[in-house]
């Protein structure tokens, strides 16, 4: 379980960095009215999507197997959790699931459009919102790797 937690912790840096790059790239592409290229724009958005999904799978495993997830809720009940425990067991998992759903919606919407500007806009808005949600519920004080 500790290995899983370590991988989730390390991967968090990569996921946040790549999401940030994808969002900045989309904002710059939108503002500059650039063409949406396969080599750069498609790749970076897809990479951010895959990494988020990988982190989602690891997170779900942690939720079910770590002592800070479902087990913590079962031990003291939802109302018995203090704020830091609630962040780990409830807020972080649920908000991050919503965030990754938004990122996935952004990905599928970008594919529906032909125009570069609209593709960049879909990525910028949905990946951007997802990233903000993720940042709002990181257990910062526990994250030391
Ligand atoms: C991109 C999305 C995510 C990021 C960046 C992220 C990041 C993190 C970080 C930095 C920690 C603290 C690790 C530590 O103690 O050093 C953590 C813990 C945790 N995460 Fe995530 N996470 C994400 C998604 C998820 C999802 C979707 C779930 C569940 C569905 C989840 C479940 C958990 C759980 C249960 C813990 C506590 C693990 C423990 O202390 O044993 N995470 N996450």
Image: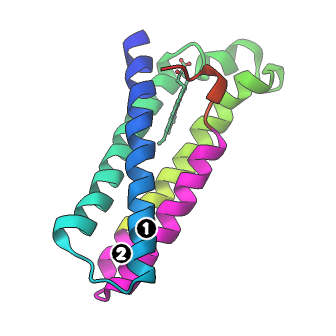
Which residue corresponds to mark 1?
A: 106
Q: Residue 86 falls in which quadrant of the image? A: top right
> Crowding at label 1, few (<14), some or many (≥20) Cα neighbours within 10 Å?
many
> Residue at the spot x=37%, y=39% of the render?
14
Side of 126 where 58 appears, left or right: left
* Magenta run includes residue 57: no
Residue 72 x/y as whole percent: 66, 16
Q: Which element carries disc 2, helix, strand or loop? A: helix
Q: Nearer the viewer, residue 32 or 68?
A: 32
Q: Residue 110 falls in which quadrant of the image? A: bottom left
> Residue at the spot x=63%, y=29% of the render?
140
Residue that protrudes farthest toward the left in the picture: 39
Vertical placement of residue 48 versus 68, above or below: below
Q: Which residues are magenta?
A: 108-137
Residue 52 x/y as whole percent: 39, 46
Which residue corresponds to mark 2?
A: 110
- Find out whether the residues at labels 2 and 1 contact each other: C-beta distance under 8 Å: yes
Colour approach in the figure: rainbow
Residue 28 x/y as whole percent: 42, 73
Q: Is residue 1 visible?
A: no
* Magenta run includes residue 136: yes
What quarter of the picture does the N terminus occupy? top left
Q: CA distance from mark 2 to mark 1?
A: 6 Å
> Residue at the spot x=50%, y=66% of the render?
126
């Amino acid at each position: 379980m500790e290995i899983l937690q370590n991988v989730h912790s390390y991967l968090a840096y990569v996921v946040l960095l790549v999401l940030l790059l994808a969002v900045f790239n989309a904002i710059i592409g939108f503002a500059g009215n650039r063409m949406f290229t396969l080599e750069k724009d498609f790749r970076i958005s897809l990479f951010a999507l895959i990494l988020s999904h990988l982190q989602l799978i690891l997170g779900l495993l942690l939720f079910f197997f770590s002592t800070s997830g479902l087990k913590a809720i079962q031990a003291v009940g939802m109302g018995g959790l203090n704020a830091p425990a609630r962040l780990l067991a409830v807020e972080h998992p649920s908000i991050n699931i919503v965030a990754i759903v938004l990122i996935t919606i952004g990905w599928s919407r970008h594919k529906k459009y032909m125009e570069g500007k609209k593709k960049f806009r879909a990525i910028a808005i949905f990946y951007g919102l997802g990233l903000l949600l993720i940042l709002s519920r990181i257990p910062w004080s526990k994250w030391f790797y």
